């Protein structure tokens, strides 16, 4: 049954940041993050094209990290802003802001660093876990010298018996200029500490992965005791046994034409969910599932912004 009008647009399909689909990339990321934690890695690098779903996957998994002893590991997130002044003090300032800590204009780097260190130590005592994870998103906006701020945090926390693992997240290919700098002898101490582990994340790369995601639309419920996503928007069709996952072959075939024409390695999750959400909440309810065709998918892909984000068709 369709939800009351005042609740209808609260559905996760209308709020992409609340939509959490499990993918092969997320499974691999979960495995690698725990391997890094359990083997004592002090850092790692995660790369991927823009809008493949790196941040969404990390934010989802950050609440489910644990030690070998099944103790929950606190995780902290900061997104690096683009600024004219790229200094160590600005790194500590943004870290404090991300934790809602007090920041004054005249705070020095050491004051800010100590404030953030004490914040993490307090959380370690509160949670009973001597491990902590710091996720640094948009790391391509940093300059190499700013990475010393994270080495300082690691050292200070280690003296207080807290092991910090710093996970850097960067857009491919923008981050590689910085990575090349870090690989020089001048930054050997940074590379050895944070960049010996790495993982590249892709979006959807096969029909099977598309079908797996569409299956979740057929099985996830909103509200928790309410209808499945597909039934929420297409109650009559769902009642008659129709499922969104039945379109997986056609949807993948249409996307494959963009994959070929634009030499796209994968279907980024942001573009995929925008396409499917539009199809499910707008086109199919308006036109009916029996009117589904390739043109409908093409239009939803256009609305998702995939094509404008690409440079040019392959020659």
Image (spheres, grey):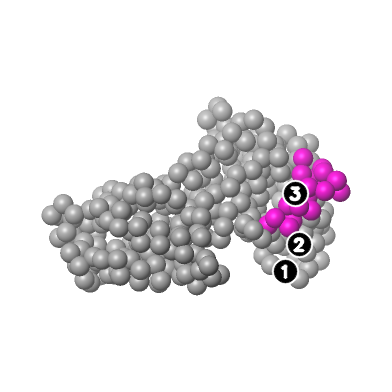
Contact check, label 2 and label 1, Cβ < 8 Å? yes
Q: Which residue is the extreme one toward the right?
A: 186
Q: Which residue is mark 2?
A: 90
Q: Nearer the viewer, mark 2 or mark 1?
A: 1
Give the magenta part as a residue range.
175-192
Mark linked to residue 83: 1
Q: Secondary structure at mark 3?
A: helix
Is 168 rendered above or below residue 281? above
Q: Name the dominant secondary structure of the magenta segment.
A: helix
Q: Which residue is the extreme one toward the left?
A: 240
Spatial separation of the CA atoms under disc 2 and disc 1? 9 Å
Spatial separation of the CA atoms under disc 1 and disc 3? 18 Å
Is 217 part of what is drawn in magenta?
no
Residue 112 drawn at (x, y percent): 77, 56
Query: Counting residues from the N terminus, which is met first, the one under dot 3 or under dot 2?
Result: 2
Q: Residues within 10 Å of mark 2 (few under 14, many from 20)?
A: some
Q: Residues within 10 Å of mark 1 (few under 14, many from 20)?
A: few
Q: Residues within 10 Å of mark 3 (few under 14, many from 20)?
A: many
Is 93 rendered above or below residue 44? below
Is 177 part of what is drawn in magenta?
yes
Contact check, label 1 and label 3, Cβ < 8 Å? no
Is 27 rendered above or below residue 110? above
Residue 19 drawn at (x, y percent): 40, 56
Q: Secondary structure at mark 2?
A: helix
Residue 80 drawn at (x, y percent): 67, 60
Mark linked to residue 150: 3
Left/right placement of residue 14 relative to residue 225 reads: right
> Which quadrant does the N terminus fall into?
bottom left
């Amino acid at each position: 049954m369709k939800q009351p009008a005042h609740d209808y647009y609260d559905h996760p399909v209308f709020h992409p940041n609340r939509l959490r689909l499990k993918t092969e990339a997320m499974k691999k990321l979960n495995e690698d993050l725990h391997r890094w934690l359990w083997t004592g890695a002090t850092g790692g690098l995660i790369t991927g094209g823009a809008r493949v779903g790196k941040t969404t996957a990390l934010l989802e998994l950050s609440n489910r990290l644990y030690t070998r002893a099944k103790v929950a590991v606190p995780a902290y997130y900061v997104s690096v802003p683009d600024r004219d002044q790229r200094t160590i003090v600005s790194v500590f300032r943004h870290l404090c802001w991300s934790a809602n800590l007090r920041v004054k204009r005249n705070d020095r780097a050491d004051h800010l660093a100590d404030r953030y260190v004490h914040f993490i130590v307090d959380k370690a005592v509160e949670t009973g876990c001597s491990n902590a994870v710091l996720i640094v998103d948009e790391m391509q906006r940093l300059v190499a010298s700013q990475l010393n701020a994270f080495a300082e945090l690691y050292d200070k926390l280690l003296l207080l018996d807290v092991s910090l693992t710093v996970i850097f997240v960067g857009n491919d290919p923008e981050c590689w200029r910085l990575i090349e700098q870090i690989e020089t002898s001048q930054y050997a101490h940074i590379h050895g500490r944070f960049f010996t582990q790495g993982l590249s994340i892709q979006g959807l790369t096969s029909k099977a992965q598309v079908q797996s995601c569409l299956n979740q639309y057929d099985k996830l419920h909103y509200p928790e005791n309410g209808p499945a996503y597909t039934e929420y928007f297409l109650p009559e069709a769902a009642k008659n046994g129709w499922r969104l996952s039945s379109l997986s072959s056609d949807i993948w075939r249409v996307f494959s034409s963009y994959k070929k024409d634009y030499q796209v390695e994968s279907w980024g999750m942001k573009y995929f969910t925008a396409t499917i959400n539009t199809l499910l909440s707008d086109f199919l309810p308006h036109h009916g599932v029996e009117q589904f065709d390739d043109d409908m998918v093409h239009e939803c892909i256009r609305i998702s912004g995939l094509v404008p984000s690409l440079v040019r068709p392959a020659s």
